[in-house]
Amino acid sequence: MSIQYHGSCLCGKVKLTVPFENAHLSACHCQTCRKWNAGPLMALAHNGEINIEGQINITHYNSSQWAERAFCKECGTHLYYHLKGTQHYYIAAWLFDDIKQLEFTTQAFIDKKPSCYDFANHTHNMTEADIWAKAAKNSSES
């Protein structure tokens, strides 16, 4: 059973409705995410359709050959990281107003995390090498 989460950017010109079967919070500590967010990207992974109102207010930045990052061009709120050519998104977690409880499950690029902060939660920690190995495996299975 999926739960519809509703969220918006700071100015409200972009609204998202996303059906999650089982939403899990993850953090990415790569340098690009930290520069983009002024800290780790805290996100909910979603593979499927996203209902977006205010699409005209979204700007996409091609951050690599395989991914783009989206933000509201009015207020600058970070919306999602999207794997090009797929329906796989990492949606900024705190856009959603109706999140009641989330399980913090994964930290990506843990070997790139600065030593000045730590999360107390026990999570599955993936290094840069782990991420690239998983990506290579997924692309060979396609």
Image: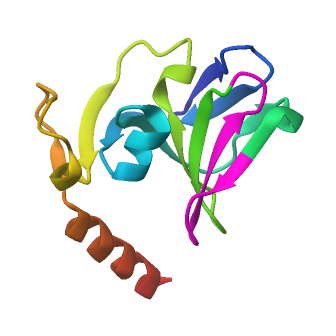
Residues in magenta, as a range: 60-75
Check the image and report above or below for 85 versus 42.
below
| Residue 54 appears in the picture as rendered | yes
Q: Residue 71: give x, y in percent of width and height.
A: 67, 36
User: Is residue 70 in the magenta section?
Assistant: yes
Residue 82, picture quadrant? bottom right
In the image, taking residue 42 as reference, residue 113 lies left or right, namely left
Specify the color scheme. rainbow
Residue 17, picture quadrant? top right
Q: Residue 83: give x, y in percent of width and height.
A: 57, 61
In the image, taking residue 51 as reference, residue 86 lies left or right, namely left
| Residue 22 appears in the picture as rendered | no
Q: Residue 107: give x, y in percent of width and height.
A: 24, 44
In the image, taking residue 24 as reference, residue 85 lies left or right, namely right
Q: Residue at x 36, y 80 (%)?
A: 136
Q: Residue 46: give x, y in percent of width and height.
A: 53, 45
